[in-house]
Amino acid sequence: MSRPALRIVGVACVMATLAVACTGGSDSAPSSTVPTPATTITPQRSGDDQLTIGLLLPSSDPIMGQGLIEASNIAVERINAAGGVLGRPVRIVEQDEGLSDGGAAGVAALLASDLQIDAVVGPTSSLTALNELDTLVSAGVMSCSPTATALALDDFPDDELFFRTAPSDSLQAQAIADLAQRTGVQNIAIAHVDDVYGRPFAGAVSDALSEGTRTVTTYPFVRGDGTLEDIAQAVVESGARVVVVLAGSDDGTAFLEALTKTNFGSLIDVIVNDQFRNPAEAQRIEALDPSLRDRVRGVAPQAQSTDKDRPFDPPGLFAANAFDCVNLIALAVDLVGTDDPSVFATQIPALTTRGRVCRSFDECKRLLDESLNINYNGPDGITELLVVGRPARARFDVFAFDETGRGVFEQSIVASGS
């Protein structure tokens, strides 16, 4: 039977923690500016009818890297067991993402491979993505990051060749705003690190909160300029009942330390972003005034299942995201009948919406073979990409801190954006 009509649509830092997405915040950014991508022209290239996927993942990282690599390989094994793509087995070429050179060596090695790389799973780091995406796009290679979440990637000129299965910080901003709105509080403060990470993040949260009659006031801070305690005091004196703190784990914890020196004023809730859930800061969180620590809740992209009865398959931090990248690439190639990235990449978002739900390559391929549209939902059951290549919905963990400063899961929430 004929294929469904082609749907032409417009189309990461290694974590030190269970659910800290790779935003490239102020603690890890090597400079105060985000690299500006050069204008690129994607070269014409044709497929060779052999889907080859490069893995640009941190193989030396035992916490997350190995899990991402294993998940990618499991996906390929299952695809090949189902007959492969274009009648041939899918091939994998692995390169360590590394961090010391911003991923440049790994990208160069993939592009210089004897095998023609059609797509890359990775990078994990937002900074690597911002630095190296232009090179991949210029080479006409598509890429899918399972963990890069930086807001700066939302508008990257990627020629429809870059996708993310991890939610952008713009979606995390919506989740944070949703949590703040549930308090019913009308006077909200946002304290944020004053850099290229914190400013747009704070702007996104503020925009999401500014509907209705809420009063939202922002307080930018720079650690080390001697004003941290003054800004914390200003937040308390503002009369805000909820404060949202947006920063990397080191700078953000420093703000909480400054806040603990105040009387907390009328604050009933302190809402923090994903990077606070960093074990490296547990001792500092433990040392906070318990009455403040008990008011802190955080929001982080769900990295792995919290349901013991229904664990993600395969298991591991963001493993389902890498698994999804591989499956979506393979399904898109199978759909259009070519491994030319300029052709198959544009089909990826449409595979995740408005069709028959399926969760595996084999199941989805059978539906495509029957000329049916599909809604690929992957292991976590919530895979939906916007035409611009980032998730439209995502599940987030809400966490608190126990008396040892360790982040403890409380509940899941789903945020939607556009």
Image (spheres, rainbow, N blue to C red):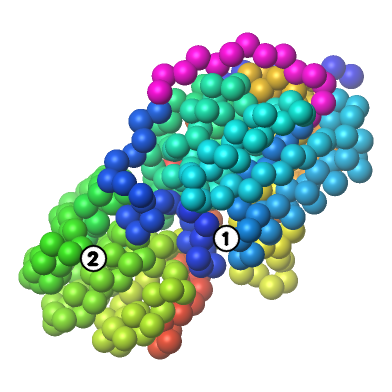
**Numbered disc in front, either 2 or 1:** 1
Residue 344 visible, this angle:
yes
Q: Which residue is mark 2?
A: 243
Q: Residue at x 74, y 55 (%)?
A: 70
Q: Residue at x 56, y 50 (%)?
A: 98
Q: Secondary structure at mark 2?
A: strand
Tag 1: Cα neighbours inside 10 Å, few (<14), some, or many (≥20)? Answer: many
Residue extent of the magenta highlight: 38-51
Asked whether residue 40 is drawn in magenta, I would say yes
The image shows residue 150 at horizontal and vertical percentages of 42, 45
Q: Amino acid at mark 2?
A: Val
- Residue 372, label in figure: none
* Residue 306 versus residue 124 in the image, above or below: below
Residue 231 visible, this angle:
no
Lower position in the chain sequence, tag 2 or tag 1: 2
The image shows residue 166 at horizontal and vertical percentages of 54, 48
Q: Which residue is mark 1?
A: 303
Residue 50 relative to residue 43: left or right = right
Which secondary structure type mostly characterizes the magenta part of the structure? loop
Q: Amino acid at mark 1?
A: Ala
Residue 405 relative to residue 136: left or right = left
Disc 2 and disc 1 in contact, CB within 8 angstroms: no
